[in-house]
Image: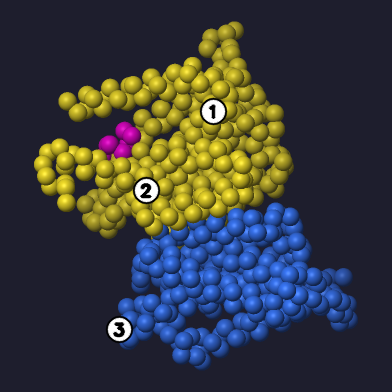
Amino acid sequence: MIPKTKTYAILALAAFLFFIPVLWADEFYLNVIINIYLHIILAVSLNMVIKTGKLSIAHAAFMGVGGYTSALTVMRLGLPFLLALPLSGLMGAFIALLVGRLLLKLQGVYFVLVTFAFGEVVRLFFVNLVEPFGGPTGIINIPPPRIALFPGIAFTLLSKVSYYYLVLGVMLVTLFLIHRIYQSSIGKAMDCTRETEHLAEFTGIDTFQHKMFAFAAGGFFAGLAGSLFAHYYRFISPESFTFWESVNLIVINVVGGMGGIAGPIMGSIFLVPLPEFLRGFVEYQRVLYGLILILTLWFMPAGMLGVLNKALDRMKAGKTGKEGTP
Amino acid sequence: MGETLLPQVIINGVTLGTNYILMALGFTLIFGVLRIVNFAHGEFYMLGAFFVLTAIIKFEVNYLLAAIIAVIAIGLLGYLTEEVIFRRFRDKELEGMIIALGLSILLQNLGLVAWGPYDLSIPPVFTGVLKIGTLFYPLERLMVVLLSFLLMAGFYLFLKKTKLGLAIQAIAQDTEIARVQGMRINRLYPLAFAIGTGLAAAAGAVIGPLFQLNPWMGIMPQVKAFIVVILGGIGSIPGAFLGGLILGVAESFVSTYASKALADLLGFILVIGILLFRPSGLFGRSQLSR
């Protein structure tokens, strides 16, 4: 009974998302929503890394790897966007596998500090290598995605509405895949790796391989998001993928709640539009951001998801018996 | 030419190194005692420099007095920060780190609100150039190095000779044993945090006159402090000294004989190298012992 209602709810939600551009064709709102979707892809893929107990501050670097890969693949190699998109993801995963072998051996604080250092290295690479990355000014005039269905029939995603559907599609696929991973035995092994690493080792779980998997898959989806980002804004520079963007993704996870996919989704929906509606007082936006982060950890350490779960539990308890009421 | 260049390169490297050490000391102290990775350390440095500027311009006090005011004010701010916020996240390394990130965002942008986004500078304190043979050395930088050495010596004596310093060291080594010995953690933790942030402010006050002041000025010194501390071993005071000197001199050599871009990358290359061969840094304790 319950799984069925859940399925209907999800289908209804998907249909609603599909009709958003019809209901609000407003460019401003579509731009905000596209931005939310991009952040959902990024924040949920970071959540997978956090699920194995590793707080990475290098996630924006993988997004950057994807963005540059995609722009250069299309502009220099002349390959179609539909090839550049998965290639960006693969490049993100490849770099993650390459550095993960070293980074993921580090414990606790060292891992955090070194991912921070790695993020800076990547940024400095983009800044210092004018060929092919364009140096500090980055790459401009990135073409919008051109999608060829059959030879001779191709269309260019120039409008915000068409781009909305592209990002929506990639986001839904990402969420579906990560949800399946979380439901599978791999997801359970990730939880064990985070909670009791030694015990997990004793029960035969190769914790290092699971961390590597999460890190590489995280790099893959971040790379995809980078590609979507590059062809949407049609301009990238090293400043698009700094330490602060990585921190931003952590804030989204903390405020939304790190304990599941729904957390970073809620975090993105709440936090990404915030600057857009605070345009009147630009200076105070980030002050507020910092305050929200501190207050969330202080008063609701499990984030919005934690509050929601508690409320749901109380409702259930209220229905089945009197235990829930004090 | 090669003969005059070499001493100059070394002197520049040591100058750079003292700046790095000053930043790293407070950072490593805070980690050693409270196990907090203080991502807001660069912001306390920034505030230190701006407090000096404001004290000199608004209240027309001299540089030295302004520096003392800044250090005490930021120290107090650090004390309150530990009392009010970090106290709730003791023994939670990850949460503590995220709180520090939030604090960093908060302070940086409060700085932006208070002082604006444009570069400001502290009026020059010392002018002139020292000339020994073919060596040139701006007097301003010499004073920075001298003041830094004074601060470091003072900090060292404080740790070795005072009761409070010894207590702080004891906590850094083993919190549980220190507690059993009757040390009052609740008083010592905020004090250690205050001393750490005070050192960051002192670094800002001393180094500030050499650079332009803006709300983001703390980011780069903080990155350098991270590198120094990873090199030397996080939580280790001798490690901070050695790491700072190594990084400063190495950067000076590379930027003179190779390129500035390579010098920027050098720190990260050193970090990755050291983690490959000695994951807990030059002076760090093994991860297993904790």
Q: Which residue is mark 3?
A: B180
Which amino acid does the dot numbered 1 rest on? Answer: Tyr
Residue A252 position within the rendered picture, expressed as x and y whole percent measured from the top left: 45, 45
Q: Is residue B119 visible?
A: yes
- Rendering colour mode: by chain
- The disc at residue A303 is 2
Q: Are marks 1 and 2 in contact (CB under 8 Å)?
A: no
Nearer the observer: mark 3 or 2; the answer is 2
- Write down which chain is painted yellow: A
Which amino acid does the dot numbered 2 rest on? Answer: Gly
Report the residue at 63% width, 82% height from top. B151
- Please check the rendered image and state whether residue A224 is part of the magenta-colored stretch, yes or no: no
Name the tint of chain B in the rendering: blue
Residue A91 position within the rendered picture, expressed as x and y whole percent measured from the top left: 52, 37
Other-residue count near label 2 (Cα within 10 Å), few / some / many at <14 / 14–19 / ≥20:
many
Residue at far top of view = A152
- Please check the rendered image and state whether residue A183 is part of the magenta-colored stretch, yes or no: yes
Q: Are marks 3 and 2 on the same chain?
A: no
In the drawing, does residue A7 fall left or right of residue B216? left
Marks 3 and 1, how far apart in space? Answer: 60 Å
Q: Is residue A98 visible?
A: no
- The disc at residue A97 is none
Q: Chain of mark 1?
A: A
